[in-house]
């Protein structure tokens, strides 16, 4: 289930100190527009990030289905995370690495 993976990502980001909102606000985390979902991230230290999720239909046509979610790109840090099966070793390894990379890139120098 892709929604479960989105929930895992949101939970991991929140544990790392990020506030997560959809493009249209806190209730818009799963709103698909033009085969994309956008999240805005912010932290108390002033760090900001924008995540863009991309959906791809099996034959390349238009889609609004969360099941067609393929990857997320972090706009400011340039990091990407590909959506693999929720129980896969790759997902369990890459999800925390992605969140850590966002946290590291969002740190402000002293």
Image: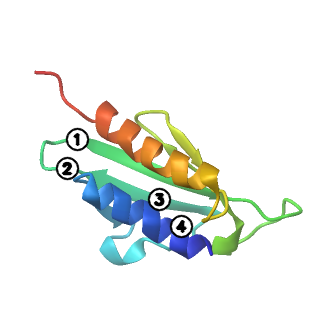
**Total marks in image:** 4
Of pointers 4 and 3, the one earlier in the residue sequence: 4
Please give left or right for residue 108 compared with residue 57 in the image.
left
Rendered location of residue 17, percent (x, y): 22, 53
Front label number (2 vs 3): 2
Front label number (4 vs 1): 4
Whether label 2 touches label 1, CB < 8 Å: yes
Please give left or right for residue 96 compared with residue 4 in the image.
left
The correct choice, above or below, for 104 with respect to 20 in the image is: above
Front label number (4 vs 3): 4
Q: How many residues crowd mark 4 within 10 Å: few (<14), some (14–19), many (20+)?
A: some
- Residue linked to disc 4: 5
**Helix, strand or loop for disc 2:** loop
- Residue linked to disc 3: 38
Residue occupying the far right of the picture: 59
Residue that appears at 33% across and 32% down: 105
Residue that appears at 84% across and 59% down: 60
What distance separates the C-alpha of mark 2 from that of mark 4?
22 Å
Whether label 4 touches label 1, CB < 8 Å: no
**Is residue 71 visible from the viewing direction of this image?**
no
Rendered location of residue 89, percent (x, y): 62, 53
**Helix, strand or loop for disc 1:** loop
- Residue linked to disc 1: 47
Of pointers 1 and 3, the one earlier in the residue sequence: 3
The correct choice, above or below, for 29 with respect to 59 in the image is: below
**Helix, strand or loop for disc 4:** helix
* Residue 19 in which image quadrant: bottom left
- Residue linked to disc 2: 43
Rendered location of residue 69, percent (x, y): 65, 63
Q: How many residues crowd mark 1 within 10 Å: few (<14), some (14–19), many (20+)?
A: some
């Amino acid at each position: 289930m892709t929604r479960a993976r989105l929930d895992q990502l949101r939970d991991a980001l929140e544990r790392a100190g990020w506030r997560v909102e959809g493009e249209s606000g806190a209730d818009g985390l799963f709103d698909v527009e033009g085969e994309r979902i956008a999240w805005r991230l912010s932290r108390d230290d002033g760090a900001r990030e924008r995540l863009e999720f991309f959906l791809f239909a099996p034959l390349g046509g238009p889609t609004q289905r969360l099941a067609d979610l393929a990857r997320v790109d972090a706009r400011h840090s340039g990091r990407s995370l590909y959506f693999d099966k929720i129980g896969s070793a790759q997902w369990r390894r890459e999800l925390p690495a992605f969140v850590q990379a966002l946290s590291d890139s969002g740190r402000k120098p002293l």
